[in-house]
Amino acid sequence: MQSDKSGRLLGIVGSMGMHPIARLSIPVRRLFVLLAISNGPVERALAAARLWPDRTDQVARSNLRRTLFQAPAGWIRSNGDDLALDADLDLTEARASALRAISGAQLDFEEITALSEDILPGWHEEWLIPMQESFRLLRVQALETACRTLSEDGQYALAIQAGAAAVTAEPLNESVAEALILAHLAQRNRFQAVQCYRALAARLVQELGVAPDPQLRRRLEAMVGALHIH
């Protein structure tokens, strides 16, 4: 992002421009994040209620006014009762990249790297958790699709980067693991393909007590031989 008003919500260390989120007061950082994940302006009353759900309406609104006064100048637009964040967000760009990937477009290194991160891991606000989970599902789907698309085009390094990130996010997802295994096979890296299969099999047995899909096993056996995947 080139704008001076750029917000980073992906990854552990977030920031708003030159202000690391951790250095902002807790009320200000929570307000920034709430506005950042919202699709459009947020009414003041709704923002106050979400940020201070255990306070009366009067106290919550007073807290919101105080927080707005403390926020760095120029970052929040106020239009009557509505508030909006005036910033370019990495989350917005990552969502766009994810939708492009799902539609079949190829991703580059920077886009895959962005989609390898969750929204502010370690934050457990009730109003943030649904967005965190929704974005995680979106990015995993995008990474898996990108892995397959890039592999088909012979861009194996990027395909494996995307597939590995998807497996890290959802280690029990057999479809995701299959995409990465097939990318390794397409690159003629049978050793890594077998290692990925073994890791998947071990996780599935340990966590769910089941074996991988027999179809995936048969496909791998056809490429490397049955003796090598045990």
Image (tube, helix red, strand yellow):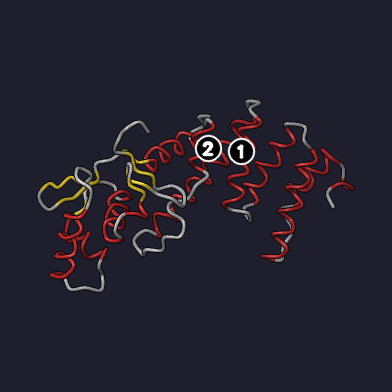
Name the kind of residue labelled 2 in the image.
Ile
Residue 24 vertical placement versus 116 (above, below):
below
- To which quarter of the image does residue 7 belong? top left
Horizontally, residue 82 falls left or right of residue 126, namely left
Q: Say few, some or many: other residues with alpha carbon within 10 Å of mark 2 (under 14 / 14 to 19 / 20 or more).
A: many
Q: Position of residue 13 (x, y in %)?
A: 43, 50
Extreme-top residue of the structure: 153
Name the kind of residue labelled 1 in the image.
Gln
In front here: 223 or 112? 112
**Residue at coordinates 50% horizontally, 29% vertically from top-left?**
105
Horizontally, residue 45 falls left or right of residue 13, namely left
Which residue is under mark 1?
161
Q: Position of residue 197 (x, y in %)?
A: 74, 49
Q: Position of residue 223 (x, y in %)?
A: 82, 38
**Residue at coordinates 44% horizontally, 38% vertically from top-left?**
99
Q: Identify the mark at residue 112; answer none if there is no mark.
A: 2
Residue 19 vertical placement versus 206 (above, below):
above
Helix, strand or loop at mark 1? helix
Between the C-alphas of marks 1 and 2, the distance is 7 Å
- For the residues labelled 1 and 2, say whether their Cβ atoms are less than 8 Å apart: yes
Horizontally, residue 182 falls left or right of residue 228, namely left
